Image: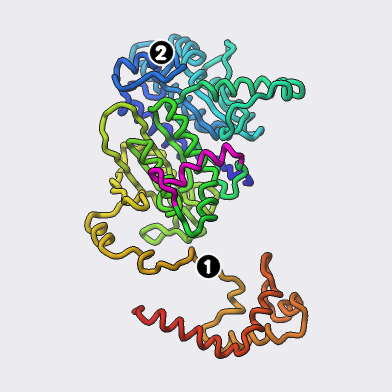
C-alpha cells in the first residue's frame, strides 16, 4: 500500500496483452503477434523507414518485451500463455502431432521466448513469486528447463539507471551482485519494442531521486514553453506521482527503438487533469495513435454510471479511477495524422467491467475519436457543435483573473449553519471562553484535527470587535456575488 502497489486483475491483463498482440499483427504485419520471431533485419527489409537501432544485431528478434513494474509476473505469465496457444494452433494447422509440438515448444522457449521477456521488480516478495509463477506456467505448457536460460525478471528499480555495485554487493551478497550486473547490462543495451505494465500509483512518491524527477521534468513544458500554474505545488505533486514517471520511462524505452507499442494501466487523471496537460502534449508528440479506455471508478468522488448505478473501481482503491492506455509509436511514414480514440466503461466490476475486458480487445468495441483542443489537450470527445459553442464564450480565467484552486473546510457542524444566528452564538462562546484552547474545544464539542492552530483561530475571532456586524457584512457580500444566479 505504501508503494501504491496493487495486484492486477487478470481481465485487465488479458485485455492489454491481447490488444498488444493484435496491434503487432495489424500495425507491423507480424502474423504471429507476440509469438513472432521476425528479426530486426527482416523487419527493416519489409519497412524501408524502419531503422535498426545502434547496438542491435540484425539477427535479434524484433519483438522485445518489458514489464517495468512486474509485481508477481501476471503480465509476463499471460504473454507466455498467449504465445503458447498461438504457436500450438499454428503447428496443429501445419499437421504436427503432440510429440512434435512438444519438441518444437521446448526448442522455441529458450531460443525465442525467455530471451525476449524482461521484467523489473523492486520488492523482493513479488520478485520471487514472479519467478515461481513463470516457472510453473512453463512447466504447465510442457517446457522443461534444460538450458542455462533464465527468466529475465530482475530485482531492481526501473526508474533508476544502471549502477556499478562492484565491491559492495559482491562482498556482501554474491547472488545480488550477479543480479545487479545482469540487469545493468539489460538497462544499458537492450532495446524494447513492447512495454506493458501496471505501474504503482503513489501521489506521495518514494521515487524522488534526481533521476526520477528528471524523468517528469519534460512535462513542465509544452512545445518548449514553461507551464505556469497558480497551484505550482499541486502541479509538482501531480507530476511526481509514480504512474506519471512510468509513463515517461516507457516512452523513453520505446524511443530508443523509435518504434513499438505501449500497453499500460494507470490512473485516469492524465486524461483531463488541467495540471497534466504537459503529459498529454508529450504523449501526443511521441505516439502516432493513442487509445484510452477509461474504466472510471473514482469512488471518493462519488462516481456513478450514466444510468445512475454504482461505478466500481477494478482495483480495491477509492481515490483513483483507472485507464488502459495503448500507444503506437512508429518511425514508418504511414500517416502524419495524430489519432486519439477514447472509450468508457462504467458499472459493477464483476458484472460489467471484468466481462467486458475478457471479451474484447481494442478492435472489438466502439471508440470515439477525440479532437484535441490546443490549450489543455484534453483526451475528451466533444462534438463539433459543442466545441464551437464552448470556444465562443470567454475563458473562465479571463472572466475571473484572480482565482484560487479551491478551499477545504473543516469542523463544519460547529462553524456552519443555515442562518448566522447560531453561528454567531457559537463564535461568541469560542471567543469568550476562559478555558484553555484544548479545553474550550472539548467543552464546546468542537472536533480537533491535526494541523489546526487553535490559539491563532481564537485570536482571529477576538480581533473582530463586532462579530454580528462582521457576519452580516459577509452575508451581504455573498448575496451580492450570487445575485445573478437563477
**In the rendering, at what x and y percent does residue 300 appear?**
52, 59
Quadrant of the image containing the C terminus = bottom left
Q: Residue furthest front?
A: 225
Residue 88 seen? no
Q: Which contiguous range is marked in magenta? A: 209-227
State whether residue 143 is above or below residue 289: above
- Which corner quadrant of the image does residue 382 belong to? bottom left
Residue at the (27%, 28%) spot, across then down: 333
Can the viewer see residue 232 in this picture? yes
Query: Circle 1 is placed at which residue position?
Result: 407
- The residue lying toward the viewer, choosing from 228 and 460, is 228
Colour theme: rainbow
**Residue 122, position as x, y percentages in the image:** 62, 34
Which quarter of the picture shows residue 258? top left
Residue occupying the point 65% across, 87% down: 428
Please rate how many residues cluster around mark 2, counting C-alpha atoms within 10 Å: few if below 14, some from 14 to 19, many from 20: some
Q: 315 or 95, which lies in front?
A: 315
- Magenta residue check for 242: no
Left or right placement of residue 290 versus residue 298 in this view: left
Image vertical order of residue 231 relative to residue 432, above or below: above
Q: Earlier in the sequence, mark 2 or mark 1?
A: 2
Residue 210: in magenta span:
yes
In the rendered view, would you say 248 is above or below 36? below
Q: Is residue 459 above or below residue 336?
A: below
Residue 292: x percent and y percent?
38, 44
Q: Secondary structure at mark 2?
A: loop
State the residue position of label 2: 58
- SS at badge 1: loop
Q: Residue at x 46, y 83 (%)?
A: 477
Number of numbered markers? 2
Mark 2 and mark 1: Cα distance apart in space? 58 Å
Amino acid at each position: 500500500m505504501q508503494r501504491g502497489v496493487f495486484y492486477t486483475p487478470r481481465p485487465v491483463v488479458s485485455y492489454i496483452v491481447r490488444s498488444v498482440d493484435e496491434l503487432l499483427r495489424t500495425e507491423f504485419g507480424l502474423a504471429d503477434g507476440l509469438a513472432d520471431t521476425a528479426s530486426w533485419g527482416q523487419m527493416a527489409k519489409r519497412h524501408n523507414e524502419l531503422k535498426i537501432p545502434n547496438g542491435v544485431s540484425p539477427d535479434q528478434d524484433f519483438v522485445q518485451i518489458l514489464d517495468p513494474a512486474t509485481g508477481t509476473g501476471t503480465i509476463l505469465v499471460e504473454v507466455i500463455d498467449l504465445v503458447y496457444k498461438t504457436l500450438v494452433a499454428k503447428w496443429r494447422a501445419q499437421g504436427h502431432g503432440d510429440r512434435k509440438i512438444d519438441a518444437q515448444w521446448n526448442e522455441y522457449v529458450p531460443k525465442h521466448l525467455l530471451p525476449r521477456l524482461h521484467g523489473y521488480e523492486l520488492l523482493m516478495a513479488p520478485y520471487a513469486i514472479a519467478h515461481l509463477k513463470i516457472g510453473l506456467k512453463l512447466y504447465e505448457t510442457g517446457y522443461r528447463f534444460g538450458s542455462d536460460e533464465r527468466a529475465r525478471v530482475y530485482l531492481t528499480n526501473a526508474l533508476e539507471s544502471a549502477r556499478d555495485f562492484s565491491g559492495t554487493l559482491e562482498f556482501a551478497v554474491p547472488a545480488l551482485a550477479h543480479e545487479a550486473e545482469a540487469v545493468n547490462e539489460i538497462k544499458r543495451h537492450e532495446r524494447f519494442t513492447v512495454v506493458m505494465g501496471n505501474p504503482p500509483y503513489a501521489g506521495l512518491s518514494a521515487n524522488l531521486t534526481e533521476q526520477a524527477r528528471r524523468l517528469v521534468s519534460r512535462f513542465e513544458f509544452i512545445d518548449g514553453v514553461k507551464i505556469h500554474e497558480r497551484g505550482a505545488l499541486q502541479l509538482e505533486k501531480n507530476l511526481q506521482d509514480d504512474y506519471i514517471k512510468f509513463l515517461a520511462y516507457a516512452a523513453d524505452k520505446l524511443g530508443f527503438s523509435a518504434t513499438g507499442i505501449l500497453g499500460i494501466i494507470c490512473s485516469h487523471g492524465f486524461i483531463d487533469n488541467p495540471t497534466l496537460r504537459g503529459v498529454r502534449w508529450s504523449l501526443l508528440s511521441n505516439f502516432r495513435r493513442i487509445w484510452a479506455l477509461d474504466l472510471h471508478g473514482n469512488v471518493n468522488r462519488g462516481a456513478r454510471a450514466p444510468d445512475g448505478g454504482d461505478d466500481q473501481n477494478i482495483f480495491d482503491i477509492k481515490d483513483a479511477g483507472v485507464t488502459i492506455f495503448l500507444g503506437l509509436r512508429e518511425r514508418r511514414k504511414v500517416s502524419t495524422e495524430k489519432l486519439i480514440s477514447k472509450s468508457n466503461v462504467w458499472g459493477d466490476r464483476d458484472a460489467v467491467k471484468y466481462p467486458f475486458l475478457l471479451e474484447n480487445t481494442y478492435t472489438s468495441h466502439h471508440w470515439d475519436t477525440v479532437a484535441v483542443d490546443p490549450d489543455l489537450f484534453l483526451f475528451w470527445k466533444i462534438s463539433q457543435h459543442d466545441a464551437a459553442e464552448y470556444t465562443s464564450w470567454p475563458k473562465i480565467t479571463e472572466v475571473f483573473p484572480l482565482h484560487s484552486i479551491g478551499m477545504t473546510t473543516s469542523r463544519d457542524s460547529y462553524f456552519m449553519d443555515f442562518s448566522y444566528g447560531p453561528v454567531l452564538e457559537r463564535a461568541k462562546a469560542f471567543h469568550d471562553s476562559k478555558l484553555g484552547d484544548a479545553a474550550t474545544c472539548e467543552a464546546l464539542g468542537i472536533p480537533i484535527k491535526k494541523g489546526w492552530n487553535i490559539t491563532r483561530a481564537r485570536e482571529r475571532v477576538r480581533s473582530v470587535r463586532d462579530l454580528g456586524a462582521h457576519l452580516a457584512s459577509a452575508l451581504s457580500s455573498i448575496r451580492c456575488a450570487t445575485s445573478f444566479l437563477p
